[in-house]
Amino acid sequence: MWFVIKKTFSDRGIEMAQATIKKSTRNFWKDGREFLVSYELKTHESSGTSGYLIRAHLKEKSPEGKEKETGSCVELLYLYQEVSERIFNLIANAEEPVFPIHLPDIVRDEIFGALVKSVESYF
């Protein structure tokens, strides 16, 4: 199993075929601020290469009513759907919400951990 992780923050004007596999949304409050974080797992095909996208989108509303939005997207190439779904479920069901800024690091760490386990089980 080999893979490529690529952080993407826009679709860069490239036409991509996508289909949503899973979605999850969470609301939470902290320090008087309201947060809505949503996650999506999508299939992805671009230039003959297929893979998966995990997207995180965060809306923050302050007590004064000001809103901020941020997002992140990780592109998983050459990774099995089961592994992509397991990583998505880990993020979507985490005890504490995963902020978009942390998405690439969490995905990278989970894939690395899976690779180490597969090598250890081989020997």
Image (cartoon, rainbow, N blue to C red):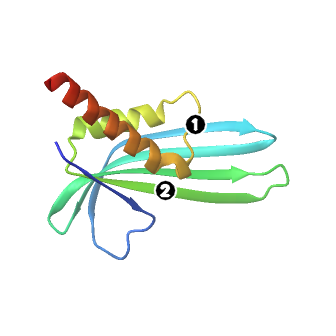
Residue sitting nearer the eye, 100 or 15: 100
Left or right: residue 81 compared with residue 64 = left
Q: How many marks?
A: 2
**Residue 71 at x, y percent in the picture:** 53, 57
**Residue 29 at x, y percent in the picture:** 72, 37
Which residue lies under the disc numbered 1? 97
CB contact under 8 Å: marks 2 and 1:
no
Left or right: residue 21 compared with residue 47 = right
Q: Residue at x 80, y 40 (%)?
A: 31
Q: Residue at x 22, y 25 (%)?
A: 120
As drawn, the label of residue 67 is none
Residue sitting nearer the eye, 87 or 66: 87
What is the CA distance from the residue labelled 2 to the residue labelled 1?
A: 14 Å
Indicate the quadrant where residue 117 lies.
top left
As drawn, the label of residue 72 is 2
Q: Residue at x 30, y 40 (%)?
A: 84
Residue type of the residue flagged with mark 2: Ser
With respect to residue 89, does 11 lie above or below? below
Secondary structure at numbered mark 1 = loop
Residue type of the residue flagged with mark 1: Pro
Residue sitting nearer the eye, 101 or 112: 112
Left or right: residue 33 compared with residue 10 = right
**Residue 110 at x, y percent in the picture:** 37, 37
Which circle's residue, 2 or 1, is located before the other in the chain?
2
Q: Residue at x 46, y 36 (%)?
A: 91
Secondary structure at numbered mark 2 = strand
